[in-house]
Image (spheres, grey):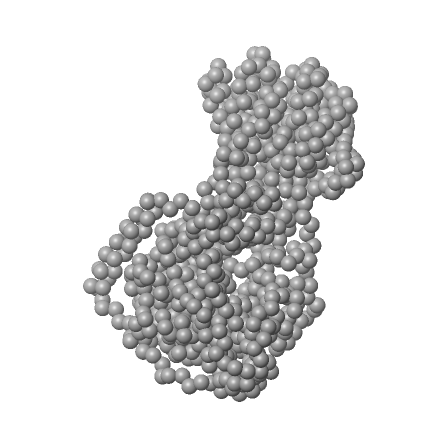
Amino acid sequence: MARGTFTGGVHPYDGKDLSRHMPIKTVYPRGIVVFPLLQHMGAPAIPCVKVGDPVLTGQMIAKADGDFSANIHSSVSGMVVAIRDCETVGEKQEKCIVISNDDRFSEIPYPPVRKFGNLTPIAIESAVRGAGVVGMGGAGLPTHIKLSYEHPDEIDYCIANCVECEPYLTSDYRRIVENPAKVLNGLRILLKVFPKARGIIALDESMQDVYSELRRYTAGDHRIYVKKLESKFPQGSERQLIYALTGRTMNSKMLPSDIGCIVNNVDTLVAVNQAVMLYEPLLTRLITVSGDCIARPRNYRVRIGMSYAELIERAGGFSSRPALILDGGTMTGKRITNLNVPITKLSSGIIALSKDRAAAMKETACSRCGRCVEICPDKLLPITIYNDALKGDKTSFIKHHGLECCNCVCCSYICPSKIDLADKINNMKREILANPDEAGDYSRRLSYREQK
Amino acid sequence: MTGTKPFTKSSMTTGGMMFLVILSLLPSVYMGVFHYGLHAALIIVLSTSTAVVCELLFEVIFRRTITINDYSAAVSGLILGMILPPNVPLYFPVVGSAVGILAFKMAFGGIGKNILNPAMTGKLLLVVAFRSKMNDYSCDSFGKQTPLTDMVNGNDVNLVDLLTGNTAACIGTGCAVAILAGAVILLLVGIIDLSIPIGAFISFTILMILFGKNGWNPVFFAVQYIGGSFLFTVFFMAEDYSTRPLTKKGRLIFGLIFGCFTAVFRLMGYVEDAVVFALILCDLTVVIIDRKLLPVPFGLIQTGRSARKIREARRRRERLERERAEEKDSDDMVWENELDTDVLESDSRTPEDRG
């Protein structure tokens, strides 16, 4: 049963009007392009080119290491100049392949396009695997993992996530406005893998225009449904999304496939469509460049490996000096201090803000107002768990279901005392999950990372 | 500079909430001063300023962070002033406030850590120490007794006076209209919710019907609700953040307990003081309620029922699909020619602004 929403959640300022009306623009990188070997969950890919090798656009430069890893392809043509540690988002040093771009973008030859009617689940899965498609929502789980579920008959719902609850980001919206056919075809490809599934395209209630258009497109297709969901953070989070659409609930020990659902971001579906129909690997992604310090906020189709600094420069630069630059939206993004870091498959936007609102707010003592309890989408007691984490009391942390926390950071957002609950809870959670004996069943979701 | 998400936060602060509470209390303060005159105003000013000064002094002496700018001390002091009779000597609010703040708030560790409501403990102390003085409501033309006591003693009560506050009562608790106006403000801005009031009214009403010896008499109930600070305590004092349970369910139970205690104390013969004892006793139960009533996390329990529901949904769908398949033979390839489609266009090779 569709509820259209979930209990709890917050309504942060979304700032989507800055960029949602501007069409997507394509930008091409110049000069050096950097490909980190870790652009997904799981183990870093293994380079399959050497320094000095010439590469073409679309050529594989790093091969997946294991099931939870993904191939990486060069998005430009040119020459490999180095394979070394470079700085990536979050001030980390990671091994990267550095390619100097010859500005010609000469492509490897692609086979002729596939016929939709001839597709088989195995062909689809291997095409997706080969193209290095990963979930574009942020977690970066390789998409072929979701497609290779051992009981495809048990999947009832195949959900295209276009809710985009994250503030400022509008790339999913632009994607579905500009390429609805690609999204629909991507969804139809997934429905071929899961023969008993229904496809649901989940939209935000503010996307009325797309809603009617998609309804028209899918009128003759009895397997695809279009649904509108309430604008609320974190509506786009897997658990809340599934609950709002199907009424099925899921906890931290489970995967969506356990309750018969597969969730994919619309951008991922487009990548699936490109990979399966055209053999095109994942070379570009949509990046929202927005915020009040950006001269011309809009969405850009960007080659993976381009640096943020170059993207901002090509996007018209800053209109004023930003106090806060974020990779991603204001709720779940990461602060960027050095703009010379590459865009990866997991980037989603770059937001430059003139005011660092959160930093200006001082933390005060908790008044036990209970707002965090009211808005917690997981129905936890954030403040109790936070106190357990402060004390380092693992037993009561687990007893109060601290491991169920999905790290949506709503509690930190809403707290009138400006306490950073989510950060502390998440640290504690990670500490416990690092030890499989204490984590018990909860280690299952995290096991992706461990498979190295 | 924070390094962690979220990078945006709601604009509501503790100070902001407490300020709204003060605003919502102002109608009652105004009505109290209007009816009882300057002395009442002086009591309120004294109790409020004592509370703030005490908190400030405590924090300066013990070198804690200064927290008077979150207005919580001001709220406690203001409320204490409002629940005192209008003609008490001026050292009453000073003593009550000082003890409430120093011994029952700051000694526990400040806002959010106190177990007992500071204003109510202040009043409790005064009630215990000066029982007769605290039960003397005479002021200007008003009599010594409140309407509730009057009614208990078998006299007639004017309901309209009870609504407008034109009667003997504590300074801030006499006017039902002003209290309800304040409660509506708090409800609208989301500072309180209705779970405590609902619980309190339910259990109080049931017990009063059963044992009040007045049956359904509406006048009796109106006086019981409005008189004796019941309304004020339910909407303003029981909702004190530090001393109420965290969850909605817990608050409902808290309200039920409060209603029970109040009814029991009133039936035992404590008229005006019933809510004082009831609230203090209830505050002691909060720790237990919070510990025992853990909410069930989202999706934690996957019952056989939900698994069965999934199975049923599957069967229903299969039947539906079989019916549909009979209706028309769906053709996979139809759409490919039908839509003016970009499905087979490259996504990365869009020929725009290259170079």
Task: Specify the quadrant of the image occupied by residue A391.
Answer: top right
Task: Specify the quadrant of the image occupied by residue A342.
Answer: bottom right
**Residue A404 % position (x, y):** 48, 49
| Residue at 56 percent of width and 72 percent of height | A95
**Residue A290 % position (x, y):** 60, 67
| Residue at 69 percent of width and 26 percent of height | B122
Q: Nearer the viewer, residue B53 or B156?
A: B53
Residue B184 visible to an observer of this rendering:
yes
Q: Residue placed farthest to the left in the image?
A: B326
Q: Nearer the viewer, residue B201 or B251?
A: B251
* Relative horizontal placement of residue A399, taking residue B103 as reference (left or right): left
**Residue A30 % position (x, y):** 59, 82
Residue B180 visible to an observer of this rendering:
no
Is B199 drawn above or below residue A342 in the view shown? above
* Relative horizontal placement of residue B63, taking residue B296 as reference (left or right): right
Is A444 drawn above or below residue A291 in the view shown? above
**Residue B27 % position (x, y):** 66, 34
| Residue at 68 percent of width and 52 percent of height | A361
* Relative horizontal placement of residue B328, taking residue B30 as reference (left or right): left
Task: Specify the quadrant of the image occupied by residue A317.
Answer: bottom right
| Residue at 30 percent of width and 47 percent of height | B308
Q: Nearer the viewer, residue B296 or B252?
A: B296
Q: How many marks do you count on the picture?
A: 0
* Relative horizontal placement of residue A144, taking residue B280 as reference (left or right): left
